[in-house]
Amino acid sequence: MYERPVSGLEAKTKSRSRVIVLSVNGETHEVMVRPRHRLIDVIRDQLNLTGTKDGCQSGTCGACTVLLNGRPVLACLTLAVDCDGKEVRTIEGLAENGQLNKVQEAFLDQGAIQCGFCTPGMVMSATALLDDNPKPSRHQIDKALEGNLCRCTGYNAIVDAVLQASGQGGVKPVMK
Ligand code: FES
Ligand code: FES
């Protein structure tokens, strides 16, 4: 279990701002936040992890999806102060030793990316789904991704990619 370290910086803070401690992609960060700051503000503006997209800013598009203690959340609707002491995983934290994870690989194989704006959120939601349910049905994938909007792909390639990542679908043949 992640343990919140004691912070010297926190002891000096006297304003309404406060220091929170986050584990982001396995690294511990102390960040100063105001009560109105959202998790996505910290991720993008303070930690420079810009893979997570700030789309609608109102909980509609899913582009800002990250994992908080392993569960998918909308970072645009999550207050940073509520994340104190928690573990955050963003799209930048999925690859290991330079290798994309199986969902990322499958999105590439299936051509499930066009403009790419929705892709980080889609991949995070799909990764959370497969962590919970390694062999989801097409219907279960649809349900898991229903909060992630895509204007470009028509969704079929995305669902095919999640099926491939779960070992239930084949890699598309490469066009020559
Ligand atoms: S930016 Fe968070 S749901 Fe759209
Ligand atoms: S690839 Fe463009 S919004 Fe999904």
Image: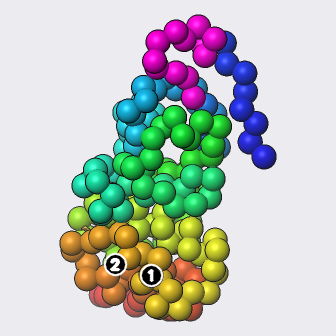
Q: Residues within 10 Å of mark 2 (few under 14, many from 20)?
A: some
Q: Quadrant of the C terminus?
A: bottom left
Q: Is residue 110 above or below residue 121?
A: below
Amino acid type at circle 2 is: Gly
Direction from residue 111 to residue 102 in the image, left or right:
right
In the image, the segment drawn in magenta is: 9-20
**Residue 33's x, y, as percent?**
46, 26
Q: Nearer the viewer, mark 2 or mark 1?
A: 1
Within the magenta stretch, is there residue 32? Answer: no
Q: Nearer the viewer, residue 105 or 50?
A: 50
The percent coordinates of residue 165 (x first, y second) are 54, 80
**Label 1: few (<14), some (14–19) or many (≥20) C-alpha neighbours in 10 Å:** few
Query: Which structural element holds mark 1?
Result: helix
Q: Dot 2 corresponds to which residue? A: 111
Secondary structure at badge 2 equals: loop
Magenta segment: does it hold 10?
yes
Q: State which quadrant residue 123 falls in.
A: bottom left
Q: Which residue is mark 1?
A: 143
Q: Amino acid at mark 1?
A: Lys
